[in-house]
Image (cartoon, rainbow, N blue to C red):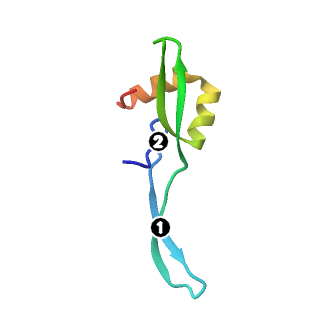
Amino acid sequence: MSAHCQLTGAEPVFGKKISHSHRRTSRRFDPNIQNKRYWLPSEGRNVRLRLSARAIKTVDLIGIEAAVARIRARGERV
């Protein structure tokens, strides 16, 4: 659960690493998770979120209030 985005739900996916000789071994693709702190004016407090880089751009676009509403709609605690 460590590499998990609270807004988009992005989590690790698995695939294969292919060497020059074309041997295949398992690998893991992790999302770019960052810890980000936002001021939530409606509650008068800061919230600390674990977001992917793409989700940080989404928060910039829709605003923190709408983002927190989406996170709570998914059933996550903020």
Residue 40, placed above or below residue 74: above
Structural crowding at the residue carrying mark 1, measured as other residues with C-alpha within 10 Å and reported as few (<14), some (14–19) or many (≥20): few
The residue beneath circle 2 is: 5
Between the C-alphas of marks 2 and 1, the distance is 20 Å
Please provide percent x and percent y for residue 48: 47, 30
Q: Secondary structure at mark 1?
A: strand
Numbered label attached to residue 36: none
Residue 31, placed above or below residue 34: below
Q: Type of residue at label 2?
A: Cys
Taking the spot 48% from the left edge, 11% from the top edge, the residue there is 44
Q: Type of residue at label 1?
A: Gly
The residue beneath circle 1 is: 15
Taking the spot 52% from the left edge, 74% from the top edge, the residue there is 17
* Quadrant into which the C terminus falls: top left
Please provide percent x and percent y for residue 62: 60, 25
Indicate which disc, 2 or 1, sits on the residue closer to the N terminus: 2
Residue 37, placed above or below residue 25: above
Residue closest to the far bottom:
21
Q: Nearer the viewer, residue 50 or 65?
A: 50
For marks 2 and 1, give the one nearer the viewer: 2
Count of marks, rendered view: 2
Structural crowding at the residue carrying mark 2, measured as other residues with C-alpha within 10 Å and reported as few (<14), some (14–19) or many (≥20): many
Please provide percent x and percent y for residue 22: 55, 85
Taking the spot 44% from the left edge, 29% from the top edge, the residue there is 71
Task: From the viewer's perspective, tell me whether residue 73 is left or right of residue 51.
Answer: left
Residue 1, placed above or below residue 15: above
Taking the spot 44% from the left edge, 37% from the top edge, the residue there is 6
